[in-house]
Structures are given as structure tokens and as C-alpha cells.
Image (cartoon, rainbow, N blue to C red):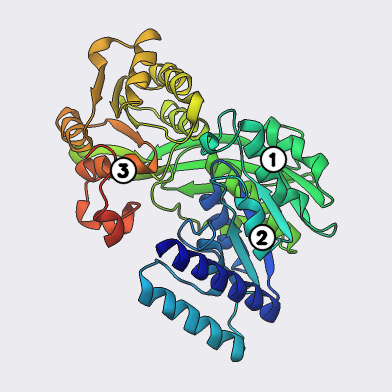
Amino acid sequence: MKTLLFTILRSVLRSLARATLWRYKPTVIGVTGNVGKTSTKLVIETVLIHEKRVRASSRSFNNELGLPLTILGSWKTTGGALFWLRVIFFSFFRLMMKRSSYPEVLVLEYGVDKPGDMQYLLSIVRPHIGVVTAIGDVPVHVEFFAGKEAIVKEKAKLIQQLPATGFALLNTDDVVVQSMREQTRAHVVTFGFAEQADMHITNFATSFENKIAAVTFKLHYGGSFIPVRIEGVLGRPQGYAAAVAAAIGLIFGMNLVDIAEALDDYHAPPGRLRVLRGVKETTVIDDTYNASPLAMEGALAALKGVRAKRKIAVLGDMLEIGKYAMDAHESLGRVAAKSAHILITVGRLGKFIAEGAKKAGMPKKNVVEFDNIREAGLFLQGRLEKGDVVLIKGSQAVRMEKVVKEVMAEPNRAEQLLVRQDKRWLEKKGSYE
């Protein structure tokens, strides 16, 4: 019965979304990739909102229900039957009574969890501008595909179905993403740290001044450049997201000066390399939204780049990577050994991270393993010292944000600062509770 109701709901939302797009004719920007989709989507919104009416969901509404939901309205959360009835009612109303406030631009995430997902989302709407953030050597969700090549092929459909008058924004630092340029009719714009990128990132640096974390860098395009500073975050992913947003701003006719001013307004979403104040005058790097090998390595690189008395990495399982799991976790442990002074792992696969770190030379006394998320949080809280910087990251099901809550200086603000704080998620147990 539940399957039937889901199928009906999916079909209704798809039809309403297609009708809404026909009625309002917004420009659609589609974002896909293995990491950085949500941050990229929100930076694009931050830039374009200075010129257009823009909608980008604050949540990762990137699947067969979430994507049409973003088209249909500015919904912040989902719910039960009454919620979906409200969505359907208001969607019909907006179709009958055209509203001048409907967005001129929609920025949509295209998520791929299993074969056929991308094609289904494209059957709802084919974007005019497509962005591929990064794929990496071991894509998340790969266990549900025949292999890496299959998931890459699925994601590439976004670029293949762009119109000839559209734009494909591709990460020039990712070999797999760059190979997609031969698969599109659209005009290709590249971004990244590589010198040949159209939107070229240079002078990337991390700073901690007056207890405020920030990344600074320059964006170069066509012989001109702008300096960018984004506060409250760390990591190269912020540079990539800003580069994409700047390139799209140019496509929409903005100049680099206006784009630089718009980027000043960006604030990273919860759980994406966001810097929080910790207990005992420590600093917490909260990257708990989800995890893949590429994202984990990026987070550890951000930790490594920070100057601190002690650096602590608290890492949970990376899920949905199938046959790559053991090797990927051990490899991550080797990276952690070069990035942190202390390593705390959570979960069954986390034990392979610990093993990899010890093989790479991290002292055994500095590697601690846990099978329970709360025990890990309490241990970390007791081990912290003034001046420590802590990175916390793991896959969604591990619920590493619960470790953050144990050591953040303002746990009373968890609802505003952390991921997965709505009632539905708080009632749902993680893998190691």
C-alpha cells in the first residue's frame, strides 16, 4: 500500500512540476556531482539573487520528490500526508492564479542514488545550465551501480541533455568531469585551480584571526580578477563553489565587481566545513552532512592547513561505496595520519581508518576506536584542551552531528547550526546508537 501511495505521489508531483515550469518558464540551473552540490547551489543563489528572483532549496531536495518540491514552492521541510496535500493544493492554486513572485531562476540539485535516477529527474526538467562539481575515484552510492563507470555515465546525462544554447560548467581539476566536455552540445566553461581553467582560482589561503575562520582566494577570468573572502568556513570546496557562482553570474550579465560584493553575503550551510566555537575554547570544523572518499580527503586537507596546537580528526564510516570500502577507509587513515595529531573513529568501517593511520606511523596511543556515537562524543569532550581544532565527519547514517553537539560551545543553538535537527531526524536512530 505504501509503495502504491508513493508511486501516486511521485506521479502527481512530477505532473504538477512540469505544468508549473510550462506556466512560469524559469531559467533552470542543474547541479550534480559527488561532493559540494548543496554549497554550490546556495552560492549560486547568493550571487544571482542580486539580479533575479531566485529559488534554491536550503535543504538537499535532490531526489524524485525533493526536486519537484523545489519547483513547486519554497518548502523548508517535508512531512506526512497532510503536508503533501498542502503542497498539491497550493500548487494547483499557483497554476490557476499566476503569481508575479514566482522565481525567474531555479537552482536545482540532481542527485543520483541508483540507476535511472538522473533520467527520471531530467524527465521533469532539463536545465539550461548544468554544473558538475566533482566525482572522484570512488563516488558515493557506487555500491548500487555496476561500477564507477556506470555512476559517471548516469551523472553525465545532465550534461548530455543540455541545449546547444546552454552552458556546461565543468571542474577542470577532476579528470572524470573534464572528460564530459565531449558529451555536450552546450558551451563549456571550466573552473578550478588548474591554470587552464576559464574561472581560475589562485592564492587560496586559510586564516584564523580574532577567532574567526575564513578562506581567501582570487578568481581570475578573461584577464581580470577579484579577491574573495568567505568567513566561517574552511576548505577548497568553498573556492570551487564560488568559482561556479561567479561564472554563472557572468553568464547572467553581472560584472566581477558585483559578483565579489555578492559573495560577501554567502554563509555556508550546516555540516559543510562550517567552523563552530567548541567547549574549552576549542574550534570545531563541522563537516557532518555526509561523507565520501573525495570529501573526506578534502576535509582532512582543510584540517591540515590550519595552524593549531593539536589537531583532532573524528571520523565515521563512509557508506554506500561497496567493494571499495576496505581500501578506501585504510587509505583515508593514511591521510589522517599526516593531517591530525589524534584520530578518533566511529563504526565498523572506521576501524579500517584507524588501522590505516597506525600503519602510516600514527602512534597507537593517539588512535581511539568507538562503536557508539555517544561514547565517542563524551570521550572527545573529556580529551579536549584549549586551542584544539577538531574535524568531525562521517556518512549521514552514522549521525556524526551528535558528536558535534557534545563539544560545541552553544548546544542550545543546535537547531540553527547543525544538520538534521528537525523532529523526524531527531527521533531516528543512527547506525551506532
Question: Which badge, 1 or 2, is on the more N-terminal residue?
Answer: 2
Q: Which mark is residue 43?
A: none
Q: Residue at x 23, y 29 (%)?
A: 371
Give the amino acid at mark 1.
Lys
Q: Residue at x 33, y 18 (%)?
A: 354
Please report contact status of discs 1 and 2: CB closer than 8 Å, yes or no.
no
- Crowd class of label 1 (few under 14; some 14 to 19; many from 20; radius 10 Å): some
Q: Nearer the viewer, residue 428 or 240?
A: 428
- Distance from label 1 to label 3 (Cα)? 30 Å
Give the amino acid at mark 3.
Arg
Left or right of 66 in this view: 220 = right
Q: Which mark is residue 153?
A: 1
Name the quarter where the N terminus is drawn. bottom left
Q: Which residue is mark 2?
A: 29
Q: Residue at x 74, y 49 (%)?
A: 159
Classify 331 as above or below 34. above
Name the quarter where the C terminus is drawn. top left
Q: Which residue is mark 3?
A: 399
Left or right of 230 in this view: 361 = left
Name the spot of residue 361 as percent of width and height, x first. Answer: 37, 8
Q: Quadrant of residue 303?
A: top left
- Element carrying mark 1: helix
